[in-house]
Image (cartoon, helix red, strand yellow):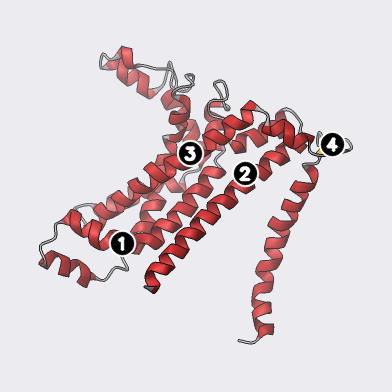
Amino acid sequence: MKRRERILYLLPACILITAFFLFPLCYLIYVSFFEWNGLGPMVYVGLENFKAVFEDPEFHMAVKNTVIWMCAALIVHIPFGLVLALMLNRKPRGWKFFRVMYFIPNVISTTAVAFLWYFIYHVDVGLINNVLNAVGLESLAHPWLNDPDSALIANMVPFMLYVGLTMIIFMTQLATVPRELYEAAVVDGATSVQVDLKVYLPLMKPAIITNIMLNLAFCLRTFEYPFLMTGGGPANATTNLSLYIYKEMTGANRYGRSMVAGLATVALGMVVMIFVILLQRERRKERAK
């Protein structure tokens, strides 16, 4: 392929990236140096917005909660999707039905799911507390969304419903594994668990990397759950970076500070991408050996 043809193929993507990412990012950096309420004139304040945001305890809590979401995705969500994929890959009775059922939440809006779980957790009319009261376990009834110790975990539980997409990506990768490898392992006397660990899991690295990237990106932009279920409370226990940006922009009318928080989110996203790139390089080195 000639150089001119390469440029023509890449040009539409470059235009889109410039228009919808690079230009907004440059504007984000520009506004972060100004004090602005969104309507009046912008006043240059230098690094004051950066200082104010980085010294704000609520921002520290937002970063902490965002990182906790990301850790939950790595430690719980992705392994859960992998286990489901390995189980359904054995094609037990009704596996197609369960595959569809696990994926259904992914076609429901996160707003609807957030409202649903808000009422499930509700202190007085919520399903969880009503069931506990009905079976005589009143002592376990709890204000799930009003307690700082449980509110963040309660916000993350609906996120686990979206494990279906993670599972499907793993199942797609499993479908590419040659059947001969499985049959050879069985002939050698390997159990189902040993086949999963020794045959399938080493070949799942491309899907694992893809799921890491998608799930961490989802965690970085999660907004509906803390906004609709708790509003970031109680005591900012569920505020994440997306909600912090929203509060600074619409609640306090401090657009400059919200842009600084946006830059922090972009920086955290770049760290995630570097992490994924390093994983891909390690995989390529292993394949080259």
User: What is the secondary structure assignment of the residue under circle 3?
Assistant: helix
- Amino acid type indicated by mark 1: Pro
Q: Which mark is residue 45?
A: 4
Quadrant housing residue 124: top left
Front label number (3 vs 1):
1
Q: Give, as a three-letter code, the residue at label 2.
A: Thr
Badge 2 crowding class, 10 Å Cα cut-off, few under 14, some 14 to 19, many 20 or more, is some
| First in sequence: mark 4 vs mark 3 | 4
**N-terminal-most mark, 3 or 1:** 3
User: Where is residue 153 shown, x and y percent of the image?
Assistant: 43, 30
Q: Earlier in the sequence, mark 4 or mark 1?
A: 4
- Distance of label 3 from label 1 (alpha carbons): 26 Å
Label 1: which residue? 202
Q: Earlier in the sequence, mark 2 or mark 4?
A: 4
Sequence-first tag of 2 and 1: 1
* Vertical relation: 251 (above or below) 33: above
Above or below — where is 62 with respect to 207? above
Name the mark nearer the viewer: 2 or 4: 4
| Alpha-carbon span between mark 4 and mark 3 | 33 Å
Tell me where residue 229 appears, x and y as whole percent.
52, 28
Q: Amino acid at mark 3?
A: Trp
- Give the crowd class for mark 1: few <14, some 14-19, many >=20 residues within 10 Å: few
Question: Which quadrant: the C terminus?
Answer: bottom left
Callout 1: SS:
helix
For label 2, the SS is helix
Rounded to the nearest angstrom, the CA distance separating label 4 from label 1 is 53 Å
